[in-house]
Image: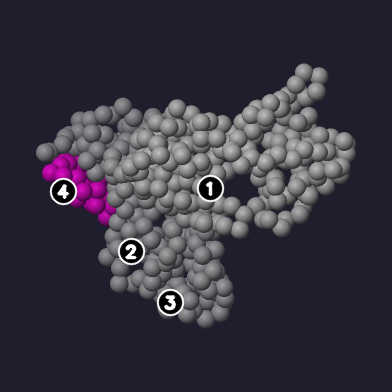
Amino acid sequence: MKAQKPSQSGKLRIGSRSSPLAKVQVQEVLALLSAQDIFVDHEHVLFTSQGDKDKVTSLIDNPADNFFTDTLDEALVRNEIDVAIHSAKDLPKNIPSGLKIFALTTALDETDAFVGKSRLSELPPGSRVGTSSLLRQKFILEINPSVSPVDVRGTIEERLKLIEEGNCDGVVVAAAALKRLGLEEKIIEIFPWEATPLQGQLAVVGREGDKETEKLFQPIDIRRSYGRVSLVGAGPGDPDLITVKGINALKNADCVFYDYLVHPDLLEYAAHAEKIYVGKRKGDHTLAQTELSRMLKEKAISGKNVVRLKGGDPLIFGRGADEISYLRSYHIAVDIVPGVSSATGIPSGLGIPLTARGVSSSVAFLSGHGESEKEHDDRPLEIPKADTLIFLMGLTKLNVIVRTLREAGWKRETPVMVVSQGTSLTEKDVTGTLETI
């Protein structure tokens, strides 16, 4: 199939930055199209982005979100080009109004690579290791605390030249960039850490509403094969308190990630799904959050419909917000299914009003751990001004909570109830006052 785009030249106008890597990336996209028997008559238009002009501003200082895409975005809006091809990791979090990602390609390589005089762990103390990422600096020091990370900018060729000229003893760069430029033999080692989201992938961006051009690139859009992730609230403990929408999500799931707060009966709704236990509780941190997020991503990218089943509501005092942000950074669709929070479900089940005329006109929900998740952190909690306070995850912090409330001026006769495993058959309730609890 041969595609034509109406323009003065009758060709599809493809924009990119002017670096050798950007030029190769355009050819890679054209090759992906030709592998689908799509041959594009085109002209390649080169641009210099703000990030190309400004070699002084450090990427560690969080420059503008569109530092490397601004000029191309503007050219699209002005109808000077029909599509722009970017390194996908350079895309801004929010695509400018009127523009749309037409395709994300399969990653050539997602990893970070080291180019240097020896392996990173073998470099002597004081060696200078170049990178443009604060996160990479952290990982570098974890492998070799004796080296000195230095902030570097520029094209791949310019970064490698720093080693040749003796300004750096090594640099950390994207393995995909080296491979695309035919410089793979310079790689000393590949690192095990998870690199920047979308690293190694290419993005095709066009004008929203340009259906003809968008259709042209659909065959190479890897997102077409992605599954979805649903964060589903399981309720406070009683399996009957899950929502109908939550049940339907479980029935349609290919894979369910669940923790110890989830009643086992709920898993029966996902009879044919893969079940993965990822529970976190005191003294039993089954899976680190970073690893859990990565597993959610990998299952979704492999085409699975994934349910992350969470106790209570998925966005109250959990890692739901972190998971949403992480998954969306990879352009994975995320659905949220609200759940009955223990903060409201348990008191209601016990017939305890959180607000009552003449008694309480305000209520605040607090984490028993405050900003810290450390079990032995005894720092006082910050107490907001409210008539009723609900502490979640507070059993191991009861002494801290009581002490903090007393220091904040709450009366010793203030009624207190402590509930464990609320709404379940093993629920335990203890009542008292700040004096006796």
Please tell me whether residue 270 is drawn above or below residue 132 in the rendered image: above
Q: Residue 182 at what x, y percent from top left?
A: 27, 65
N-terminal of the two: label 2 or label 4? Answer: 4
Please tell me whether residue 198 is drawn above or below residue 205 in the rendered image: below
Residue, disc 4: 35
Please tell me whether residue 223 is drawn above or below residue 21 in the rendered image: above
Residue in the image at 19% along x and 45% along y: 33
Q: Distance between the residues labelled 1 and 4?
A: 47 Å
Mark in the foreground, 2 or 3 = 3
Helix, strand or loop at label 3? It is loop
Asked whether disc 3 touches disc 1, contact meaning CB atoms under 8 Å apart, the reply is: no
**Callout 4 amino acid:** Ala
Q: Distance between the residues labelled 2 and 1?
A: 44 Å
Badge 3: how crowded within 10 Å, few (<14), some, or many (20+)? some
* Residue 260: numbered disc: 1
Badge 1: how crowded within 10 Å, few (<14), some, or many (20+)? few
Q: In which quarter of the image is the C terminus?
A: top right
Please tell me whether residue 236 is drawn above or below residue 276 in the rendered image: above
* Residue 119: numbered disc: 3
**Callout 3 amino acid:** Arg
Instruction: Spot the residue most to the top.
Output: 357
* Residue 178: numbered disc: 2
